Image (cartoon, rainbow, N blue to C red):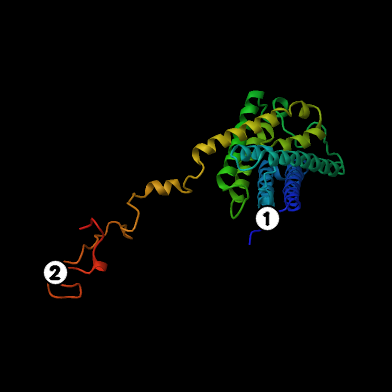
Amino acid sequence: MDVKLGAASLDSVETRTVAAEFLGTLLLVFFAVGSAVLAADYIGVLGIALAFGFVLLALCYALGPVSGCHVNPAVTLGMLLEGRIALRTAIEYWVAQLLGGIVGAALLFLLAKQVPGLRTDGAFGSNGWGKRSAVHLNTGGAFLAEVVLTFLLVFVVLAVTHKIALVGFDGLPIGLALAVIHLVGIPLTGTSVNPARSLGPALFAGGGALSQLWLFIVAPLIGGGLAACAHRVTHPPFSPSNLADDLALPHYPKGPTTAAHPTEERPGPREDRGDGDEGGEGGERPDQAGPSGLA
C-alpha cells in the first residue's frame, strides 16, 4: 500500500525539523558558551573545549535523526552546496539557528546576572581578534583561522553522514572534531566556526564583540563552502564507500565463471573415456561440462 504524506503531515515534519534546529542551537550556546562564561576559571581551556565537543555529541544523538543536527549555518551551507537539502530548508534552518543562538545567549545572560561580580559586558563568551584575542592575533590571522577550523568541522560532518541524518557512531567524530577545534582556536579567536554561536553572545556583550562580529559570520561560511567543494573531490556522489579497499584488491572478471578463490585451478570438461558411462558414448554430460572457453 502506498502511503503519501499530505500537506498537514509535511507541515508537521518541517515544524519538527526547524524546532530541532532552534532547540539544538539554543542548548549548544547555553551550555557550551556557558562553560566559558561561568566556569572558565575552574575548567580551563581543555574543559571548555570538551564542553563544546560533548554538548554537540549529545545533540547529535538526540536531534540527528530529526533534523540532522546542523545547529550551525556553516554546516547547513555545506549540506546545501552538496545538494542534500533544498534552499527552502536551508533558509528555515538558518533562521531557526540564529534565533536559537540569540535565545540561548539571552538565557545565559539572565543566569550570569545572578552571579555576583561576574562581568558580562565586552566578553561574555564572544569571539574577537587583536586586543580581544588571548594571543593578540591580527585580523588576517583570525580570518584564516576561522576558515580553516570551520573547514575541518564541516568536512567531517559531510564525510561521516551519508545524506542528512546522523545515525550510529556518526556523532562521535563530529564531537571530537569540535573539541580539537576549540583546543586550537580558543587562544586565537575564542573559536567561532558557527555564526549562530557568535551572534547571540555578541549581542549581549556589545562593544568590540559587535564591531568584530562580521568576521565570525563571513569566515565560517567561507570555510563551510570550501569544505563542501573539497568533499565533492574526495567523496564524489555515487562513489564506493571504501575506495581504498576497492583499489587494494586485485580485479578479477566478475560473472558466473569467477570462482570463490580466483587463483584456484578450475576443472575442465570431463574427458571422454569411452567406457559407456552415464555421459553416453564418446561424449560428456552437458551438465558436467566446463564453462565455455575454459580448458
Secondary element type, mark 1: loop
Identify which residue is drawn at 79% across, 39% down.
102
Q: Give the image location of residue 37, x and y in percent.
A: 77, 40
Q: At which x and y percent is residue 180?
A: 61, 42
Earlier residue among tags 2 and 1: 1
Q: Nearer the viewer, residue 8 or 60?
A: 8
User: Percent x, y for residue 167?
Assistant: 61, 54
Q: Identify the residue under disc 2.
A: 282
In the rendered structure, are the residues bearing label 2 and label 1 in contact, judged by CB atoms less than 8 Å apart? no
Kind of residue at disc 1:
Lys
Q: Which mark is residue 4?
A: 1
In the image, taking residue 273 as reference, residue 286 lies left or right, namely right
Q: Quadrant location of residue 219?
A: top right
Amino acid carrying mark 2 in the image: Gly
From the image, which quarter does the C terminus lie in?
A: bottom left
Q: In this rendered view, identify the residue nearer to me: 240 or 103.
A: 240
Going by the image, does 133 lie left or right of 279? Answer: right
Residue 117, can we see it?
A: yes
How many discs mark residues in the rendered view?
2
